[in-house]
Amino acid sequence: MSSLSSAAADLRKQLSGQLLEPGAPTYDDVRRVHNGAIDKRPALIARCLGAADVADAVRLARAEGLEIAVRGGGHNVAGRASVEGGMMIDLSLMRQVVVDPAGRTATAGGGTLWREFNRETQQFGLATTGGVVSSTGVAGLTLAGGFGWLMPRFGMALDNLRAATMVLADGRVAHVDAASHPDLFWAIRGGGGNFGVAATLEFQLHEVGPIVTGGLVVHPGPRARDLLRFFREQARDLPDEAFIVAAMLFAPDGSGMKVAAIGAQHSGPLAAGEAFARPIKAFGPPVMDVLGPMPYVASNMMLDDSFQKGARNYWKSHFLHDLSDGAIDALLVQYDRLPTPLSQIVIEHFHGAATRVPVADTAYALRDSGFNVLLVAQWTDPRDDDRCADWCRAAYASLQPFISPRRYANYLNDDDLRDPINLTSMYGANLPRLRQVKKQFDPDNAFHLNLNIPPG
Ligand SMILES: Cc1cc2nc3c(=O)[nH]c(=O)nc-3n(C[C@H](O)[C@H](O)[C@H](O)COP(=O)(O)OP(=O)(O)OC[C@H]3O[C@@H](n4cnc5c(N)ncnc54)[C@H](O)[C@@H]3O)c2cc1C
Protein backbone atom coordinates (compact mmCIF):
# COMPACT_ATOMS: atom_id res chain seq x y z
CA MET A 1 0.00 0.00 0.00
CA SER A 2 1.42 3.43 -0.97
CA SER A 3 1.89 6.13 1.67
CA LEU A 4 -1.05 8.09 0.19
CA SER A 5 -3.38 5.07 0.19
CA SER A 6 -2.59 4.23 3.77
CA ALA A 7 -2.94 7.89 4.87
CA ALA A 8 -6.28 8.03 3.01
CA ALA A 9 -7.45 4.85 4.75
CA ASP A 10 -6.56 6.39 8.13
CA LEU A 11 -8.32 9.66 7.26
CA ARG A 12 -11.43 7.78 6.16
CA LYS A 13 -11.68 6.24 9.63
CA GLN A 14 -11.39 9.66 11.27
CA LEU A 15 -13.77 11.72 9.15
CA SER A 16 -17.34 12.42 10.19
CA GLY A 17 -17.93 13.13 6.49
CA GLN A 18 -16.65 11.15 3.50
CA LEU A 19 -13.41 10.71 1.61
CA LEU A 20 -13.81 10.18 -2.13
CA GLU A 21 -11.23 8.90 -4.57
CA PRO A 22 -11.50 8.63 -8.38
CA GLY A 23 -13.95 5.84 -9.19
CA ALA A 24 -16.24 6.47 -6.21
CA PRO A 25 -19.88 6.64 -7.43
CA THR A 26 -20.36 10.33 -6.52
CA TYR A 27 -16.80 11.45 -7.37
CA ASP A 28 -17.65 12.95 -10.76
CA ASP A 29 -20.65 14.88 -9.46
CA VAL A 30 -18.80 16.25 -6.47
CA ARG A 31 -15.67 17.39 -8.33
CA ARG A 32 -17.73 19.57 -10.72
CA VAL A 33 -17.89 23.29 -10.02
CA HIS A 34 -20.11 26.05 -11.42
CA ASN A 35 -17.93 26.67 -14.49
CA GLY A 36 -18.41 23.70 -16.84
CA ALA A 37 -15.07 24.42 -18.53
CA ILE A 38 -13.26 23.34 -15.35
CA ASP A 39 -12.53 19.62 -15.44
CA LYS A 40 -10.00 18.91 -12.69
CA ARG A 41 -9.61 15.50 -11.05
CA PRO A 42 -8.49 15.69 -7.43
CA ALA A 43 -6.64 12.68 -5.99
CA LEU A 44 -8.84 12.97 -2.89
CA ILE A 45 -12.03 14.82 -2.05
CA ALA A 46 -12.67 15.28 1.67
CA ARG A 47 -16.38 15.97 2.11
CA CYS A 48 -16.14 17.59 5.51
CA LEU A 49 -18.83 17.90 8.15
CA GLY A 50 -17.00 20.20 10.55
CA ALA A 51 -13.78 21.99 11.46
CA ALA A 52 -12.22 18.78 12.78
CA ASP A 53 -12.70 17.06 9.41
CA VAL A 54 -11.16 20.07 7.67
CA ALA A 55 -8.19 20.04 10.06
CA ASP A 56 -7.52 16.35 9.42
CA ALA A 57 -7.77 16.87 5.66
CA VAL A 58 -5.33 19.80 5.79
CA ARG A 59 -2.85 17.75 7.85
CA LEU A 60 -3.02 14.78 5.47
CA ALA A 61 -2.61 16.97 2.39
CA ARG A 62 0.41 18.69 3.88
CA ALA A 63 2.01 15.47 5.05
CA GLU A 64 1.54 13.87 1.63
CA GLY A 65 2.56 16.97 -0.36
CA LEU A 66 -0.86 17.37 -2.01
CA GLU A 67 -1.95 20.79 -3.25
CA ILE A 68 -5.02 22.01 -1.35
CA ALA A 69 -8.14 23.43 -3.00
CA VAL A 70 -11.04 24.64 -0.87
CA ARG A 71 -14.55 24.49 -2.20
CA GLY A 72 -17.10 26.83 -0.64
CA GLY A 73 -19.93 27.47 -3.09
CA GLY A 74 -17.80 26.33 -6.06
CA HIS A 75 -18.71 29.45 -8.03
CA ASN A 76 -15.30 30.86 -8.76
CA VAL A 77 -15.07 30.97 -12.57
CA ALA A 78 -11.31 30.40 -12.44
CA GLY A 79 -12.08 27.00 -10.87
CA ARG A 80 -10.00 27.55 -7.74
CA ALA A 81 -12.34 25.28 -5.77
CA SER A 82 -10.81 22.23 -7.44
CA VAL A 83 -7.34 20.87 -8.16
CA GLU A 84 -5.75 18.40 -10.51
CA GLY A 85 -4.25 15.55 -8.52
CA GLY A 86 -4.44 17.28 -5.12
CA MET A 87 -6.82 17.42 -2.16
CA MET A 88 -10.19 19.10 -2.62
CA ILE A 89 -11.55 20.15 0.76
CA ASP A 90 -15.24 20.18 -0.04
CA LEU A 91 -17.42 22.17 2.37
CA SER A 92 -20.65 21.70 0.43
CA LEU A 93 -22.13 19.53 3.20
CA MET A 94 -21.46 22.32 5.74
CA ARG A 95 -24.40 24.60 4.96
CA GLN A 96 -26.18 25.12 8.23
CA VAL A 97 -27.23 28.71 8.98
CA VAL A 98 -28.00 29.53 12.62
CA VAL A 99 -29.64 32.89 13.27
CA ASP A 100 -29.49 34.72 16.59
CA PRO A 101 -32.34 37.21 16.19
CA ALA A 102 -31.71 38.92 19.52
CA GLY A 103 -28.03 39.48 18.80
CA ARG A 104 -28.76 40.11 15.11
CA THR A 105 -26.09 37.71 13.92
CA ALA A 106 -26.06 34.58 11.78
CA THR A 107 -23.43 31.87 11.63
CA ALA A 108 -23.12 29.99 8.34
CA GLY A 109 -21.18 26.85 7.44
CA GLY A 110 -18.29 27.36 5.01
CA GLY A 111 -20.21 25.75 2.12
CA THR A 112 -23.42 27.77 2.46
CA LEU A 113 -24.92 29.49 -0.60
CA TRP A 114 -26.42 32.98 -0.34
CA ARG A 115 -29.88 31.72 -1.22
CA GLU A 116 -29.83 29.47 1.88
CA PHE A 117 -28.45 32.26 4.06
CA ASN A 118 -31.09 34.76 2.85
CA ARG A 119 -33.92 32.27 3.38
CA GLU A 120 -32.97 31.62 7.00
CA THR A 121 -32.23 35.22 8.01
CA GLN A 122 -35.43 36.47 6.37
CA GLN A 123 -37.45 34.28 8.74
CA PHE A 124 -36.63 37.03 11.26
CA GLY A 125 -36.82 39.96 8.82
CA LEU A 126 -33.02 40.20 8.84
CA ALA A 127 -30.34 40.15 6.13
CA THR A 128 -26.79 41.17 5.31
CA THR A 129 -24.96 42.03 2.11
CA GLY A 130 -24.63 38.94 -0.09
CA GLY A 131 -24.13 38.27 -3.79
CA VAL A 132 -26.30 39.70 -6.57
CA VAL A 133 -26.75 36.09 -7.74
CA SER A 134 -28.02 33.86 -4.94
CA SER A 135 -26.36 30.61 -6.04
CA THR A 136 -22.93 32.06 -5.19
CA GLY A 137 -21.05 30.78 -2.12
CA VAL A 138 -21.03 32.80 1.10
CA ALA A 139 -17.39 32.02 2.02
CA GLY A 140 -15.45 32.70 -1.19
CA LEU A 141 -17.50 35.81 -1.94
CA THR A 142 -17.07 37.25 1.56
CA LEU A 143 -13.39 36.52 2.13
CA ALA A 144 -12.38 38.38 -1.06
CA GLY A 145 -14.95 41.21 -0.90
CA GLY A 146 -18.59 40.54 -1.57
CA PHE A 147 -20.71 43.16 -3.17
CA GLY A 148 -24.42 42.89 -3.67
CA TRP A 149 -27.75 44.63 -3.41
CA LEU A 150 -27.26 45.83 0.18
CA MET A 151 -23.67 47.02 -0.24
CA PRO A 152 -24.40 50.77 -0.38
CA ARG A 153 -26.41 50.53 2.84
CA PHE A 154 -24.44 48.05 4.97
CA GLY A 155 -21.02 47.76 3.28
CA MET A 156 -19.48 44.77 1.53
CA ALA A 157 -20.17 41.25 2.80
CA LEU A 158 -16.75 41.30 4.49
CA ASP A 159 -17.65 44.50 6.36
CA ASN A 160 -20.38 42.49 8.08
CA LEU A 161 -18.15 39.56 9.04
CA ARG A 162 -17.84 39.44 12.85
CA ALA A 163 -15.87 36.23 13.36
CA ALA A 164 -14.85 32.99 11.67
CA THR A 165 -13.80 29.51 12.77
CA MET A 166 -10.60 29.08 10.80
CA VAL A 167 -8.56 25.94 10.15
CA LEU A 168 -5.00 27.17 9.78
CA ALA A 169 -2.17 25.80 7.63
CA ASP A 170 -0.76 23.71 10.50
CA GLY A 171 -4.16 22.13 11.16
CA ARG A 172 -4.94 24.22 14.25
CA VAL A 173 -8.52 25.44 14.64
CA ALA A 174 -8.94 29.05 15.79
CA HIS A 175 -11.91 31.25 16.60
CA VAL A 176 -10.87 34.44 14.81
CA ASP A 177 -12.34 37.83 15.65
CA ALA A 178 -11.14 41.38 16.21
CA ALA A 179 -10.25 40.78 19.86
CA SER A 180 -8.58 37.36 19.65
CA HIS A 181 -6.57 37.66 16.40
CA PRO A 182 -6.54 41.30 15.21
CA ASP A 183 -4.06 40.77 12.34
CA LEU A 184 -5.64 37.58 11.06
CA PHE A 185 -9.15 38.99 11.36
CA TRP A 186 -8.01 42.04 9.38
CA ALA A 187 -6.43 39.78 6.72
CA ILE A 188 -9.35 37.41 6.16
CA ARG A 189 -11.57 40.41 5.36
CA GLY A 190 -10.29 40.80 1.79
CA GLY A 191 -7.37 38.37 1.63
CA GLY A 192 -9.50 35.53 0.23
CA GLY A 193 -8.64 31.94 1.10
CA ASN A 194 -4.96 32.74 1.76
CA PHE A 195 -4.99 32.33 5.53
CA GLY A 196 -6.92 29.15 6.16
CA VAL A 197 -10.24 27.42 5.68
CA ALA A 198 -13.29 29.16 7.14
CA ALA A 199 -15.37 26.34 8.62
CA THR A 200 -17.98 28.85 9.80
CA LEU A 201 -18.54 32.57 9.29
CA GLU A 202 -20.48 34.83 11.63
CA PHE A 203 -22.21 37.91 10.20
CA GLN A 204 -23.86 41.04 11.51
CA LEU A 205 -27.49 41.22 10.37
CA HIS A 206 -29.77 44.19 9.73
CA GLU A 207 -33.51 44.71 9.45
CA VAL A 208 -34.48 44.28 5.78
CA GLY A 209 -37.75 43.46 4.03
CA PRO A 210 -39.48 41.08 3.88
CA ILE A 211 -40.79 43.23 0.99
CA VAL A 212 -38.40 45.56 -0.83
CA THR A 213 -38.61 47.45 -4.13
CA GLY A 214 -36.76 45.38 -6.70
CA GLY A 215 -36.77 43.99 -10.21
CA LEU A 216 -35.78 44.66 -13.79
CA VAL A 217 -36.72 47.07 -16.53
CA VAL A 218 -35.76 45.74 -19.98
CA HIS A 219 -35.45 47.75 -23.21
CA PRO A 220 -34.71 46.82 -26.83
CA GLY A 221 -31.00 46.49 -27.66
CA PRO A 222 -30.91 49.55 -29.95
CA ARG A 223 -31.65 51.70 -26.89
CA ALA A 224 -28.51 50.48 -25.11
CA ARG A 225 -26.54 53.72 -25.58
CA ASP A 226 -29.36 55.86 -24.16
CA LEU A 227 -29.92 53.36 -21.39
CA LEU A 228 -26.27 53.37 -20.30
CA ARG A 229 -26.22 57.18 -20.25
CA PHE A 230 -29.43 57.18 -18.23
CA PHE A 231 -27.92 54.56 -15.89
CA ARG A 232 -24.90 56.84 -15.40
CA GLU A 233 -27.16 59.79 -14.54
CA GLN A 234 -29.20 57.72 -12.08
CA ALA A 235 -26.00 56.55 -10.41
CA ARG A 236 -24.92 60.13 -9.62
CA ASP A 237 -27.26 60.66 -6.71
CA LEU A 238 -28.46 57.38 -5.26
CA PRO A 239 -29.49 56.92 -1.63
CA ASP A 240 -27.66 54.26 0.36
CA GLU A 241 -30.75 52.03 0.23
CA ALA A 242 -30.44 51.68 -3.56
CA PHE A 243 -28.19 49.55 -5.76
CA ILE A 244 -28.37 49.46 -9.56
CA VAL A 245 -26.82 47.31 -12.23
CA ALA A 246 -27.00 47.53 -16.04
CA ALA A 247 -26.72 44.60 -18.42
CA MET A 248 -26.48 44.17 -22.18
CA LEU A 249 -27.45 40.70 -23.24
CA PHE A 250 -29.77 38.53 -25.33
CA ALA A 251 -33.40 38.03 -24.36
CA PRO A 252 -33.63 34.68 -22.54
CA ASP A 253 -36.57 33.51 -24.74
CA GLY A 254 -34.31 32.18 -27.50
CA SER A 255 -35.60 34.79 -29.99
CA GLY A 256 -32.08 36.09 -30.59
CA MET A 257 -33.26 39.61 -29.71
CA LYS A 258 -30.71 41.77 -27.92
CA VAL A 259 -31.87 43.72 -24.90
CA ALA A 260 -30.47 46.20 -22.41
CA ALA A 261 -31.70 46.20 -18.84
CA ILE A 262 -31.44 47.94 -15.50
CA GLY A 263 -31.71 45.76 -12.40
CA ALA A 264 -32.44 47.60 -9.19
CA GLN A 265 -33.19 47.15 -5.53
CA HIS A 266 -34.22 49.69 -2.90
CA SER A 267 -34.35 48.16 0.56
CA GLY A 268 -35.81 51.14 2.42
CA PRO A 269 -39.48 52.00 3.07
CA LEU A 270 -41.71 51.12 0.10
CA ALA A 271 -42.75 54.76 -0.46
CA ALA A 272 -39.09 55.76 -0.84
CA GLY A 273 -38.58 52.72 -3.08
CA GLU A 274 -41.46 53.81 -5.26
CA ALA A 275 -39.93 57.30 -5.66
CA PHE A 276 -36.56 55.72 -6.50
CA ALA A 277 -38.14 53.41 -9.11
CA ARG A 278 -40.30 56.06 -10.78
CA PRO A 279 -37.70 57.56 -13.17
CA ILE A 280 -36.33 54.11 -14.04
CA LYS A 281 -39.82 52.92 -14.95
CA ALA A 282 -40.46 56.14 -16.90
CA PHE A 283 -37.40 55.73 -19.13
CA GLY A 284 -39.11 55.06 -22.48
CA PRO A 285 -41.41 52.17 -23.34
CA PRO A 286 -39.78 48.99 -22.01
CA VAL A 287 -40.22 45.49 -23.42
CA MET A 288 -40.58 44.30 -19.84
CA ASP A 289 -41.01 46.07 -16.51
CA VAL A 290 -41.06 44.01 -13.32
CA LEU A 291 -39.70 46.69 -10.98
CA GLY A 292 -41.85 47.08 -7.90
CA PRO A 293 -42.51 45.64 -4.45
CA MET A 294 -41.27 42.06 -4.15
CA PRO A 295 -39.87 39.77 -1.44
CA TYR A 296 -36.23 40.48 -0.62
CA VAL A 297 -35.42 36.80 -1.22
CA ALA A 298 -36.99 36.87 -4.71
CA SER A 299 -35.17 40.08 -5.61
CA ASN A 300 -31.90 38.31 -4.78
CA MET A 301 -32.76 35.39 -7.07
CA MET A 302 -34.01 37.26 -10.12
CA LEU A 303 -30.70 37.04 -12.04
CA ASP A 304 -29.90 33.42 -11.12
CA ASP A 305 -31.31 31.86 -14.30
CA SER A 306 -28.82 33.75 -16.47
CA PHE A 307 -25.96 31.85 -14.81
CA GLN A 308 -26.69 28.11 -14.97
CA LYS A 309 -24.36 25.61 -13.35
CA GLY A 310 -22.38 23.69 -15.96
CA ALA A 311 -22.28 26.41 -18.62
CA ARG A 312 -18.72 27.18 -19.71
CA ASN A 313 -17.41 30.54 -18.53
CA TYR A 314 -14.55 32.93 -19.16
CA TRP A 315 -14.76 36.37 -17.54
CA LYS A 316 -12.77 39.58 -17.45
CA SER A 317 -13.48 42.62 -15.37
CA HIS A 318 -12.12 45.99 -14.34
CA PHE A 319 -13.20 48.94 -12.25
CA LEU A 320 -13.92 52.31 -13.90
CA HIS A 321 -14.22 55.56 -11.96
CA ASP A 322 -16.42 57.07 -14.66
CA LEU A 323 -18.71 55.62 -17.26
CA SER A 324 -17.58 58.11 -19.91
CA ASP A 325 -19.12 58.38 -23.36
CA GLY A 326 -15.91 56.82 -24.69
CA ALA A 327 -16.27 53.82 -22.36
CA ILE A 328 -19.92 53.43 -23.37
CA ASP A 329 -18.95 53.50 -27.06
CA ALA A 330 -16.29 50.83 -26.46
CA LEU A 331 -18.79 48.64 -24.60
CA LEU A 332 -21.37 49.00 -27.38
CA VAL A 333 -18.86 47.73 -29.96
CA GLN A 334 -18.36 44.64 -27.79
CA TYR A 335 -22.10 44.28 -27.25
CA ASP A 336 -22.46 43.98 -31.04
CA ARG A 337 -19.89 41.19 -30.95
CA LEU A 338 -21.25 39.13 -28.02
CA PRO A 339 -20.05 35.64 -28.98
CA THR A 340 -23.02 33.54 -27.78
CA PRO A 341 -26.61 34.05 -26.58
CA LEU A 342 -25.53 33.35 -22.97
CA SER A 343 -22.80 36.00 -22.99
CA GLN A 344 -23.37 39.46 -21.56
CA ILE A 345 -21.84 42.70 -20.34
CA VAL A 346 -22.72 43.74 -16.80
CA ILE A 347 -22.00 47.08 -15.11
CA GLU A 348 -22.33 47.23 -11.33
CA HIS A 349 -22.39 50.56 -9.54
CA PHE A 350 -20.38 51.01 -6.32
CA HIS A 351 -21.36 53.75 -3.87
CA GLY A 352 -22.47 54.33 -0.31
CA ALA A 353 -21.35 52.59 2.87
CA ALA A 354 -18.93 50.19 1.14
CA THR A 355 -16.98 53.15 -0.25
CA ARG A 356 -16.78 54.99 3.08
CA VAL A 357 -14.70 52.34 4.90
CA PRO A 358 -11.04 53.43 5.09
CA VAL A 359 -8.82 51.18 2.92
CA ALA A 360 -6.56 50.25 5.87
CA ASP A 361 -9.46 49.07 8.08
CA THR A 362 -9.71 45.73 6.26
CA ALA A 363 -7.48 43.93 3.75
CA TYR A 364 -9.93 44.79 0.96
CA ALA A 365 -8.73 47.78 -1.09
CA LEU A 366 -11.45 48.62 -3.65
CA ARG A 367 -13.31 51.35 -1.74
CA ASP A 368 -13.87 53.72 -4.67
CA SER A 369 -17.16 54.91 -6.08
CA GLY A 370 -17.66 53.99 -9.70
CA PHE A 371 -18.57 51.18 -12.03
CA ASN A 372 -17.35 47.62 -12.15
CA VAL A 373 -17.52 46.31 -15.71
CA LEU A 374 -17.86 42.56 -16.08
CA LEU A 375 -17.41 40.90 -19.47
CA VAL A 376 -19.06 37.49 -19.32
CA ALA A 377 -18.38 34.95 -22.05
CA GLN A 378 -20.74 32.03 -21.38
CA TRP A 379 -21.39 29.10 -23.68
CA THR A 380 -22.10 25.38 -23.72
CA ASP A 381 -20.21 23.86 -26.67
CA PRO A 382 -16.49 23.16 -25.98
CA ARG A 383 -15.77 23.96 -29.63
CA ASP A 384 -16.54 27.59 -28.78
CA ASP A 385 -13.87 27.77 -26.05
CA ASP A 386 -11.28 29.74 -28.02
CA ARG A 387 -13.76 32.00 -29.80
CA CYS A 388 -15.44 33.01 -26.54
CA ALA A 389 -12.19 33.59 -24.62
CA ASP A 390 -10.88 35.62 -27.58
CA TRP A 391 -13.94 37.88 -27.50
CA CYS A 392 -13.53 38.41 -23.78
CA ARG A 393 -9.82 39.25 -24.04
CA ALA A 394 -10.39 41.62 -26.98
CA ALA A 395 -13.28 43.32 -25.20
CA TYR A 396 -11.11 43.75 -22.12
CA ALA A 397 -8.27 45.20 -24.18
CA SER A 398 -10.64 47.75 -25.70
CA LEU A 399 -11.50 49.03 -22.20
CA GLN A 400 -7.91 49.84 -21.25
CA PRO A 401 -8.10 53.60 -21.99
CA PHE A 402 -10.88 53.95 -19.41
CA ILE A 403 -9.80 51.78 -16.47
CA SER A 404 -8.93 52.81 -12.91
CA PRO A 405 -5.99 51.23 -11.01
CA ARG A 406 -8.34 48.83 -9.16
CA ARG A 407 -9.74 45.41 -10.02
CA TYR A 408 -12.34 43.43 -8.10
CA ALA A 409 -10.50 40.34 -6.89
CA ASN A 410 -13.39 37.88 -6.97
CA TYR A 411 -13.76 38.17 -10.76
CA LEU A 412 -10.12 37.60 -11.68
CA ASN A 413 -8.96 34.68 -13.79
CA ASP A 414 -5.76 32.73 -13.29
CA ASP A 415 -4.28 34.36 -16.39
CA ASP A 416 -4.92 37.75 -14.76
CA LEU A 417 -2.97 36.60 -11.71
CA ARG A 418 0.12 35.80 -13.78
CA ASP A 419 0.73 39.54 -14.08
CA PRO A 420 2.12 40.75 -10.70
CA ILE A 421 0.57 44.18 -11.25
CA ASN A 422 -2.78 42.61 -10.45
CA LEU A 423 -1.69 41.85 -6.87
CA THR A 424 -1.40 45.60 -6.39
CA SER A 425 -4.60 46.32 -8.29
CA MET A 426 -6.45 43.96 -5.90
CA TYR A 427 -4.77 44.67 -2.57
CA GLY A 428 -3.33 48.18 -3.08
CA ALA A 429 -1.50 49.63 -0.08
CA ASN A 430 -2.60 46.64 2.03
CA LEU A 431 -0.30 44.22 0.20
CA PRO A 432 2.82 44.54 2.44
CA ARG A 433 0.79 43.89 5.63
CA LEU A 434 -1.01 41.00 3.97
CA ARG A 435 2.33 39.43 3.06
CA GLN A 436 3.47 39.71 6.66
CA VAL A 437 0.31 38.06 8.01
CA LYS A 438 0.63 35.35 5.34
CA LYS A 439 4.20 34.69 6.49
CA GLN A 440 3.01 34.36 10.08
CA PHE A 441 0.08 32.00 9.42
CA ASP A 442 1.02 30.18 6.20
CA PRO A 443 4.77 30.57 5.63
CA ASP A 444 4.89 27.59 3.21
CA ASN A 445 1.98 28.92 1.14
CA ALA A 446 -0.03 25.73 1.67
CA PHE A 447 -3.15 27.72 0.70
CA HIS A 448 -2.16 29.01 -2.72
CA LEU A 449 -5.04 28.05 -5.04
CA ASN A 450 -6.64 31.44 -4.51
CA LEU A 451 -5.85 35.11 -5.13
CA ASN A 452 -2.43 34.19 -3.90
CA ILE A 453 -0.41 36.43 -1.62
CA PRO A 454 3.24 35.37 -1.51
CA PRO A 455 4.47 35.17 2.14
CA GLY A 456 6.43 38.35 2.97
C1 LIG B 1 -22.83 33.57 -11.47
C2 LIG B 1 -21.90 34.30 -10.55
C3 LIG B 1 -22.36 35.44 -9.91
C4 LIG B 1 -21.52 36.16 -9.05
N1 LIG B 1 -22.00 37.27 -8.43
C5 LIG B 1 -21.23 37.93 -7.55
C6 LIG B 1 -21.73 39.05 -6.84
O1 LIG B 1 -22.86 39.46 -6.99
N2 LIG B 1 -20.92 39.68 -5.97
C7 LIG B 1 -19.63 39.27 -5.76
O2 LIG B 1 -18.96 39.89 -4.94
N3 LIG B 1 -19.13 38.22 -6.44
C8 LIG B 1 -19.89 37.55 -7.32
N4 LIG B 1 -19.39 36.47 -7.99
C9 LIG B 1 -17.98 36.12 -7.80
C10 LIG B 1 -17.83 35.32 -6.53
O3 LIG B 1 -17.67 36.19 -5.44
C11 LIG B 1 -16.61 34.45 -6.58
O4 LIG B 1 -16.75 33.55 -7.65
C12 LIG B 1 -16.40 33.69 -5.27
O5 LIG B 1 -15.13 33.09 -5.34
C13 LIG B 1 -17.45 32.66 -5.07
O6 LIG B 1 -17.36 32.07 -3.80
P1 LIG B 1 -17.57 30.49 -3.67
O7 LIG B 1 -17.48 30.14 -2.23
O8 LIG B 1 -18.79 30.09 -4.41
O9 LIG B 1 -16.29 30.05 -4.46
P2 LIG B 1 -15.40 28.74 -4.57
O10 LIG B 1 -15.25 28.48 -6.03
O11 LIG B 1 -15.88 27.63 -3.73
O12 LIG B 1 -14.04 29.28 -3.98
C14 LIG B 1 -13.44 30.44 -4.48
C15 LIG B 1 -12.18 30.78 -3.70
O13 LIG B 1 -12.52 31.04 -2.36
C16 LIG B 1 -11.86 30.14 -1.50
N5 LIG B 1 -12.82 29.64 -0.51
C17 LIG B 1 -14.07 29.21 -0.72
N6 LIG B 1 -14.65 28.83 0.43
C18 LIG B 1 -13.72 29.01 1.39
C19 LIG B 1 -13.71 28.80 2.79
N7 LIG B 1 -14.78 28.32 3.43
N8 LIG B 1 -12.58 29.11 3.46
C20 LIG B 1 -11.50 29.61 2.84
N9 LIG B 1 -11.44 29.82 1.52
C21 LIG B 1 -12.56 29.53 0.80
C22 LIG B 1 -11.40 29.00 -2.38
O14 LIG B 1 -10.24 28.41 -1.92
C23 LIG B 1 -11.15 29.67 -3.71
O15 LIG B 1 -9.86 30.21 -3.76
C24 LIG B 1 -20.19 35.73 -8.84
C25 LIG B 1 -19.74 34.57 -9.48
C26 LIG B 1 -20.59 33.86 -10.32
C27 LIG B 1 -20.09 32.63 -11.04
Image: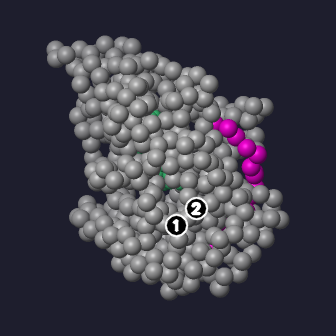
Q: Is residue 201 left or right of residue 294?
A: left
Q: Which residue is mark 1?
A: 321
Report whether 257 appears left or right of 361.
left
Direction from residue 311 to residue 147 in the image, left or right: right
Q: Which mark is residue 191?
A: none
| Residue identifier under label 2 | 369
Q: Residue at x 72, y 63 (%)?
A: 239
Q: Position of residue 444 (x, y in %)?
A: 30, 27
Magenta: main secondary structure: strand
Q: Residue 343: image x %, image y %?
A: 40, 68
Q: Is residue 247 magenta?
A: no
Mark 1–mark 2 contact, CB under 8 Å? Answer: yes
Q: Secondary structure at mark 2?
A: loop
Q: Nearer the viewer, residue 133 or 184?
A: 184
Image position, residue 234 (x, y; %): 65, 73
- Residue under the image location 39 percent in, 81 percent down: 333
Tell me which residue sits at (22%, 20%) in the image.
Answer: 4
Q: How many marks?
A: 2
Image vertical order of residue 228 relative to residue 43, above or below? below
Label 1: few (<14), some or many (≥20) within 10 Å?
Answer: some
In the rendered structure, the answer to whether residue 295 lies left or right of residue 391 reads right
Residue at (48% x, 66% y) in the render: 320
Q: Quadrant of the N terminus?
A: top left
Q: Is residue 421 above or below residue 98?
A: below
Magenta-colored span: 203-217
